[in-house]
Amino acid sequence: MSISRRDLLAGGAGGLAWALAGTRGWAAGRALDAAYVNATVWTGQGMPAQSAIGVADGRIAAIGADAVKAASTGATRTIDLDGAFVMPGFIDCHTHFLIGSDLLTQPNLREAKSPQEFARIVGEAARALKPGQWVQGGSWDAELWGGELPDRSWIDPVTPDTPVAVQRLDLHMLALNSLALKLAGIDRNTPEVPGGVIVRDKQGNPTGILKDAAMDLVKRAIPAPTEADREAAVRKGIAHGLSKGVTQVHTTELDWKTHDALRRLRAKGETDMRFYSFLPLQDWAKVKALVDAEGRGDDWLRWGGLKLQYDGSLGSRTAMFYQPYDDAPDTKGIPIHKRADVQQWTDAADAAGLQITIHAIGDKANDEALDIFAAAAAKNGPRDRRFRIEHAQHLAPAAIARFARQQVIASMQPYHAIDDGRWAIQRVGAERLKGTYAFKSLLDAGAKVAFGSDWPVAPLDPLTGVAAAVLRQTIDGANPGGWLPEQKLTMAQALHAYTATNAYAGFQDDRIGRIAPGMLADFVVMDADLFAIDPARIGGTKVLRTIVNGTERFHA
């Protein structure tokens, strides 16, 4: 199906009434290119399980054994799935895709359970590099060795000539060695950075830890990868995601690097996975100019969404709360941007018809994000906005109903619940946990809950997220009955959040997220029926095939 430039430029009052090859006008019942038979098909739309799917021209053309048989011809390729489970392709609505893709070939500190292991892994990575290269990667977790933050003295002896800048698993902290600090020009006289923290020792010297906006001080000193390097990394990330059943991701970045790499790959016809690119809210005018000039992309790579980081993270104690942290009473977290600036950007971007999402983790940050959205909607008048809050992690009781009332989507990451659940009570205490990762409370209130991974903060593997939402068992094994178990979801609720709701959260609910005639043929084949197995087995389920646009992109 060809798409004209006029189609690409089309849009409604908000610019999001997609005209790109919509399901309207697409004739079902045409001769099939492929028939997937002998399956257990969960369509994602409440109808009984089906046993066959027919695909034509990249779309679902028939569902059910009789319909598929009737539309098959001698040219139809028939694939017998031997009873396998089929469902709509997983959509991950929150990733840092280029960072995650880079980490696939960088040192992984997630398994470092002591300062000694941390130093060993960093030292081994340094010895493998060429002169002038930096040790990056990371995913370190200080909670695994008691909570003490890394110090440059841990790694200076094993990296005397190699600069190091490795990330905490939440991407809100960097650990540097002395050489990296020197190359970045950071010393005891470096002033504090608005929206960030330079951690210092008792003498005022930097320890090597930078938080949030302070990380920009060193990022400017790290040599930028080439365009070819970034494209190669993204290709690896795509292959990895497809192997996990992911057919689309939303890239919720704070820069243009991922977007630009994806555009280059799309021009070469190399995406294989679908992308919705979110760009910095501060750049709303640049994004509006792009939309005015070129439209919003196509079904493989779309743009027109904007993201802003409003506060930090719970692990870094930079998420913004009304009350101080229980284990750090000198701080309530930090705002990354001034509220007045965020309101101004939001008002302007919303008036331009762009979709907006705000990263908010602490209870105060979430309330203020909801206030900002309410003010923009009141100023600019009614329309289908689909405002989102990324994380929506720690909510004051009144905020839960506000998500539903204001029709703001809670874009959440269930794996974070079973990760943070090991130590969150130390940060905020039992009372504030009542609104933490409140999946079920939000759904019960009538809000829409969309799921993602925050890759590489958590695995790009929706099945681990589904298990987290259904079981809520923390990764340390300390909560076999579930952490805050009243927030557990059913299997259908969790899968819906990873499929149909994510499609809605990206203004694509008319084309993906369900298996129905006319929808794009994005689906996943797995080795176990997720509705029939013991929920404890969810994480062990294997993806056998991933089909995107009717073409098999992964086969185990």
Image (tube, grey):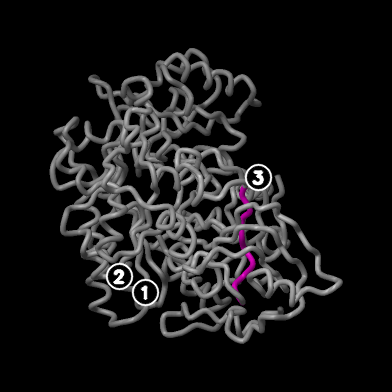
Closer to the eye: label 1 or 2: 2
Q: Which residue is mark 1?
A: 385
Residue at the image position 45 percent from the left and 52 percent from the top: 452
Residues marked 2 and 3 touching at CB (< 8 Å): no
The picture quadrant where one finds residue 259 is bottom right
Q: Please state, as top left, top right, bottom left or bottom right, where the C terminus lies in the image.
A: top right
- Given residues 403 and 210, the one toward you in this image is 403
> Relative to 433, does residue 18 appear above or below in the rendering?
below
Farthest residue, direction right: 74
Question: Residue 501 shows which numbered tag?
Answer: none
The amino acid type found where label 1 is placed reads Arg
Q: Who's the residue at 26% across and 60% down the image?
A: 369
Q: Is residue 326 above or below residue 380?
A: above
Toward the viewer: 185 or 392? Answer: 392
* Comes first in the chain, label 2 or label 3: 3
For label 2, count other residues whose C-alpha is less than 10 Å away and answer few (under 14), some (14-19) or many (20+): some
x then y, percent, for residue 357: 37, 62
- Callout 1: few (<14), some (14-19), or many (20+) C-alpha neighbours within 10 Å? some
Residue bearing the label numbered 2: 407
Q: Which residues are drawn in magenta? A: 518-526
Q: Is residue 257 visible?
A: yes
Which quadrant would residue 186 be assigned to in this image?
top left
Depth check: 225 or 100 in front?
100
Q: Label for residue 236?
A: 3
Point out the frontmost of discs 2 and 3: 2
